[in-house]
Image: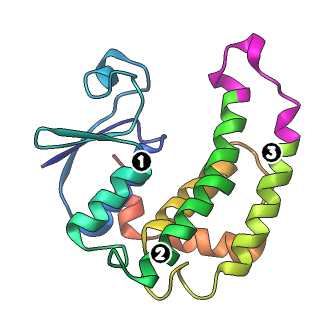
Amino acid sequence: MYKVIGATKSRAFRVMWMLEEMGVPYEHIAAAPRTDEARQYNPLGKIPALVDGDAVLTDSVAIMTYLADKHGQLTAPAGTIARAQQDAMTLWLIDEFDAILWSAAKHSFVLPEERRVPAVKDTLKFEFERAAAVLSERIDGPFLMGDEITLPDILSCHCLNWAIGAKFPRTDDKVFHYAKALRERPAFQAASNK
């Protein structure tokens, strides 16, 4: 059985949601970042971490990709055009959503106070709004990559939820309803209740 290390209100949620979607059992260890408990699995104290037997994997997207490939779910097969398109979407989401939100978090509470530049958050919100408009154009059906949920849907919805918590501008109705439908999925609810 896998172990997922990380607080539910962190990037560990992405991994938990993915495992719930796949119907794969796991143990959740709700360690906060940079705690002694988190350092047992990652010397840097970063979360999430995934324990699979003797191996410990880190980075939420790397973990999600590994799980999708290992279980053959929520992904296009490696070496296909569909997978390359999926990977392009995943990397775009990391660059244009996750990185922006992480920068805002760093300048809100992560960095030492004397290193924070609160004024940068206005620019980050502008960038996020622009990226959300592009995402809206890319939504052409119930999911980003077609008729079935894939890794990019989990990643995008997690980032959209993060944006709400960070008080970023509301997205357009198309993106709002896309994310709302994902949040209503039983697997999302199950991961949320951990």
x, y percent for residue 152 = 50, 67
**Is residue 192 highlighted in magenta?**
no
Give the mark, 3 or 2, whose residue is nearer the N terminus: 2
Tell me the kind of residue under disc 1: Ser
Q: How is the image coloured?
A: rainbow
Residue corresponding to mark 2: 84
Q: Residues within 10 Å of mark 1 (few under 14, many from 20)?
A: many
* Mark 3–mark 2 CB contact (< 8 Å): no
Helix or strand or loop: what does disc 3 sit on?
helix
Front disc: 2 or 1 = 2
**Is residue 121 highlighted in magenta?**
yes
* Mark 2–mark 1 CB contact (< 8 Å): no
Tell me the kind of residue under disc 2: Ala
| Residues shaded magenta | 107-122
Residue corresponding to mark 1: 60
Residue 100 is marked as none
Residue 124 is marked as 3
Question: Going 81% across and 53% down the picture, which residue do you hit?
Answer: 127
Alpha-carbon distance for marks 2 and 1?
Answer: 19 Å
Q: Is residue 118 in view? A: yes
